Every structure is written in C-alpha cells, then in structure tokens.
Image: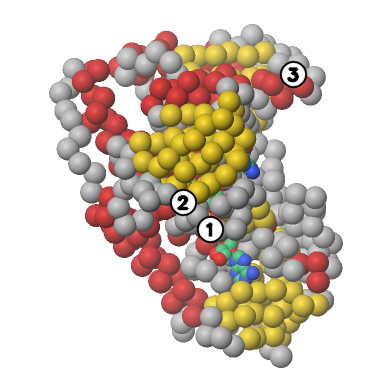
Amino acid sequence: MPHFDLVIIGSGSGNSIPGPEFDHWDIAIVEDGLFGGTCLNVGCIPTKMFVHPAELADAARHAGRLNVRSHLDAVDWPGMRDRIFGRIDSIEAGGRAYREGPECPNITVFAGRGKFTGHKALRVELHDGTTAEITADRFVLAAGSHAVVPDLPGLSDSSVPFHTSDTIMRIDDLPESIVIMGGGYIAAEFAHVFSSFGVEVTQLARGPQLLRSHDTDVSETFTAEASARYQVHLNVKGDKVSQTGAGVEVQFRTPDGHHTVEAQMLLVATGRRPNGANLGVEATGVQLGPDGRVMVDAHQQTCIPGIYALGDISTEFQLKHVANHEARVVRHNLAHPQQPISSDHRFVPAAVFTDPQIASVGVTEQHAIARGIRYVVKRQDYGGIAAGWAREDTTHFLKVLADPDTGLLLGAHVIGPEAATVIQPLIHAMSFGQTAHEVARGQYWIHPALSELVENALLGLDVPR
Ligand SMILES: Cc1cc2nc3c(=O)[nH]c(=O)nc-3n(C[C@H](O)[C@H](O)[C@H](O)COP(=O)(O)OP(=O)(O)OC[C@H]3O[C@@H](n4cnc5c(N)ncnc54)[C@H](O)[C@@H]3O)c2cc1C
Ligand SMILES: NC(=O)c1ccc[n+]([C@@H]2O[C@H](COP(=O)([O-])OP(=O)(O)OC[C@H]3O[C@@H](n4cnc5c(N)ncnc54)[C@H](O)[C@@H]3O)[C@@H](O)[C@H]2O)c1
C-alpha cells in the first residue's frame, strides 16, 4: 500500500499547495474530474468568458439610447464555445501534464474517485478500472462541491434531460428557449448570458426576490430589471418536470395559481452541496456539520490532526478567492505546524456578473437591523456622478454602511456598471481598518471615473471627520 507524506484530494485550489517547500515530501494528488477544478473548467472562468460577449451583444442592442446606431447581427455560439474551451482545455491538459511530468518528480497524480476507508486511508477507483489503496501522514480535503438537483418528479429520477452549470456551457447550439430553475448566482449569470444571446429565458425562483441573500434594495432593483428583460416567476413551488417533443415542460405553483412553462432546454441552478459525504470523510474521523460541510478550525484543520480542508468542501463562502485564501493558509500550516496562521473571513466580498453587475462586502442593512448593529447609511446613485451621466444611468447605486461613532465601514453593496471593480476600495478600507473620512479625503479620486461613486458615498456618511 503506497504511503505518502501528503495526499491532496481535489486539484482546484488544492493544486496550489505543492510548492518548493515540499520538494522533499512524497505527495499524491487525487482528481476524479478535470484537472484544475470547478473555477477553471466549469465555473468562474468560462462563465465570465461568456458574460463578456453577452455584454457586447447588449451594448450593440442598446447603444441607440446614447445615439449610436448599431444592431446585433448574430451570436456564433459554436465559435464562441470552441474559442473559450479551446483555451481552457489546453490549460487543464497543461496543468495535469505539469504535475504528472518530470518537473514534479515528488508528485503522483491519481486520476480517479477517492473515498476514505479508515483512519488516514483512502481507496481510489481509478479511471483505468483499477483501484489504489493509499495512506498518508497528512491529507488536504479540497474536493469542492456539486450541483444539487431538487427532489422533483422528472428530475430526481433523471427521466427528463436537464443541464447543470457543469454541462450547459458545452451545448451544441443555443436553444430557442430555456427554463432556469433557481434564484441565486448561477441562475442570474446564465439568465443574463442566454437572454443577451437572444434565447427566450424563463426563470423560476422559489423566493420572493432574485438574489435574496443580497441587500434588499439591491435584490429588489435586480429583480425588477431582470423581470423587464425576461420572464421571472417568484415564490415558485415546483410540481413536476416532463419531457415533451420539443424539450421540457415544468409544472409549478405560485400564489397566483398553477402554471406550466415549456422550453427547449432546462438548466437547474439550485445550489451546490459540499463533497464531504461523497468522500466518506467520516471514515477517517472527520466531522461534517449539519449543512454537509467538513468542520475545520481557524487554521483550516479538521478535528483529526494533519487533516486539513479548504474551499467549497468546508467553507461558508463558495467562492474561488476564498478557496485560494484558505489554500494559502493550509500551505503555510502544513509547512509550519508549530506556528499556524488563521484564515481571515472578516470581509469576504462577492460579485454577481449579471447585467447590472452586483458586488457586496460586509453586512447588509437588513443584517445590521436584525443584529442590532448601530449604523449610518449613504446611498449614492450612479446618476449623481459624471461617469453615470455619461451612461445616462438612472437606476443604479452604491450603498455604504458605517459605524456612526468610529466611521469604520460595516458593509458596501453596489448594483450597476463595473460594480465588482468599483467596490474594491471599500474592501480595502474594511480590511485595513480605515475610516470613511480617511479613505475619502486621504487620496485623490480620478475625475470623472466610476470610482467617484465611492468618494461621494463616503463623503455623504454622517460620521466623525
Ligand atoms: C458556474 C459557476 C460559476 C462560478 N463563478 C464564480 C465566480 O465568478 N467567482 C467566484 O469567486 N467563484 C465562482 N464560483 C465558485 C468557485 O468555482 C468555487 O468556489 C471554487 O472553484 C471552489 O474551489 P475548490 O478548490 O474548493 O473546489 P473545486 O475547484 O471544485 O475542486 C474540487 C475538485 O475535487 C474533485 N473531486 C471531488 N470529489 C472527488 C473525489 N471523491 N475524489 C477525487 N477528486 C474529487 C473535483 O473533480 C474537483 O476538480 C462559481 C461556481 C460555479 C459552479
Ligand atoms: N459570481 C460568483 O462569484 C459566482 C457565480 C456562480 C456561483 N457562485 C458560487 O456558487 C454557489 C452556487 O451557486 P447557485 O446559484 O447554485 O447557488 P445559490 O445558493 O446562489 O442559489 C441557489 C438558489 O436555488 C434555490 N433553491 C435551492 N433549493 C431549491 C429547490 N429545492 N427548489 C427550488 N429552488 C431551490 C435557492 O432558493 C436559491 O435561489 C453560489 O452560492 C456562489 O457561492 C459564485
């Protein structure tokens, strides 16, 4: 039975752990799917490579508003898909070849599905049909999460063809119509992409708003704009999914009554569950929380010394920048177990790459109220700054919350052009403990850039100067 100094399960952020400091360790990487994990192959990167062309298509469609006559001729989906995956697939192949090749002589890649069989013992069902039993002094659980499929007739029995984010980006051609189930990040981004490419989109969300984990002002604005672009049904309770000659039919209820929607394709985007149970981590003594996450301490270590976890399998934040941060912590702690460092989850930002773009960090106004946190708030409209005039923006805004006594920032929420970039100075201020006034007046703000949104919002807060 081969024994390793370290076994890493999952080649997403887990693949960034082996570095020169471990050249003297015998390391195994176990990967059941594509090398490089979700973000590279079926997540952040390809989705955003579709989002940008979607923005170009929308710009061509809507430029008339700003007196530029243009129109969208066509979207070459197969060409776009092949360009995107031509690039991604070669990075995947290169990453695997690097880890398998002579540059990494201390690393063995096991292509197959791992499952714990006992204390620090893993069985790998290899893709070549054989099985490997391996043990190690240390493990890193970096096996991510998987798409959840609702328990609905037609879906749970797999009798109706449907896509998840794992498959939808490789379809042969654009459908004429698509039903998207879910009201979260993935549903929002794909609804944007497909509607921009001319597909008739129907989105079914079980909540009263889309993106309802966001600040209510943001989710209400987004829900109104999305509903104006494509068909949105809220407060949906799914009943049944059936196959039709032309595609699929979804039967559902809302407070208005029973509904049926037909479309050529169905995308299920109803959340992702951590892979701890699939990996059988309990066989090695590792504990799972009630939501299926592997339990870790601040050093990313599980209750079993030498077994660490990172990213989607254990985190509260299913985001690539969080998985990468946690991987850096695990890497340090493996090399320096006597001087471990902790993960910093104080100010985790996120963005939704829809149209309009959305970004957030820290508490929402609703959280502040619910938790009794004292705050002052300033909402700065894009329409109130010069860069917003250039865009004739009338609906979008940045909202910032601060402590009324100290002026320290508590949260920021942006909906509008380049939100994910606009928010960064506020993430910076929160992370480094800078007050609203320090940030607003301690630096120049380029005029007339979108960043003036941040400057004006901070100056508008009723906080000490
Ligand atoms: C459609 C989509 C879009 C996204 N967009 C963004 C975005 O814009 N920004 C952002 O921050 N985040 C985004 N995310 C989330 C982000 O992709 C994840 O948070 C991140 O990739 C998690 O990294 P990880 O290393 O924890 O897991 P992963 O990258 O998922 O790696 C886990 C690996 O483990 C392998 N594995 C699983 N089980 C086993 C097993 N039993 N044996 C062997 N191998 C196994 C899997 O094949 C996988 O390769 C997106 C996710 C999706 C699905
Ligand atoms: N831009 C980004 O950073 C980005 C993009 C995509 C995904 N992600 C990450 O991936 C995660 C997964 O994305 P997601 O959109 O699948 O999850 P999500 O948690 O954002 O949204 C899940 C949605 O599905 C609904 N839902 C859950 N169970 C359901 C059921 N049984 N029936 C009907 N609806 C149900 C929820 O109400 C919610 O609207 C996100 O939470 C996010 O962390 C990030």
Lower position in the chain sequence, tag 1 or tag 3:
1
Packing grade of label 2 (10 A; few <14, some 14-19, many >=20) is some
Report whether residue 46 is seen: no
Residue at 74% from the left image edge and 68% from the top image edge:
280
Packing grade of label 1 (10 A; few <14, some 14-19, many >=20) is few
Lower position in the chain sequence, tag 2 or tag 3:
2
Rendered view: 50 above or below 65: below
Q: CA distance from mark 1 to mark 2?
A: 8 Å
Lateral position of residue 390 relative to residue 206, left or right? left
Position of the N terminus by quadrant: bottom right
Rendered view: 249 above or below 254: below
| Front residue of 103 and 356 | 356
Q: CA distance from mark 2 to mark 3?
A: 46 Å
Mark 1 lies on a secondary structure that is loop
Residue at 60% from the left image edge and 50% from the top image edge:
153
Report whether residue 255 is seen: yes
Query: Disc 3, ligand 2: is the CB inside 8 Å?
Result: no
Q: CA distance from mark 1 to mark 3?
A: 45 Å
Q: Residue 284 lies in what quarter of the image?
A: bottom right
Packing grade of label 3 (10 A; few <14, some 14-19, many >=20) is few
C-beta proximity under 8 Å, tags 1 and 2:
yes
The type of residue carrying mark 2 is Gln
Mark 2 lies on a secondary structure that is strand
Residue 352 x, y percent position in the rendering: 50, 36
- Residue 159, disc: 1
Q: Which residue is mark 2?
A: 243
Rendered view: 161 above or below 374: below
The type of residue carrying mark 1 is Ser
The type of residue carrying mark 3 is Ile
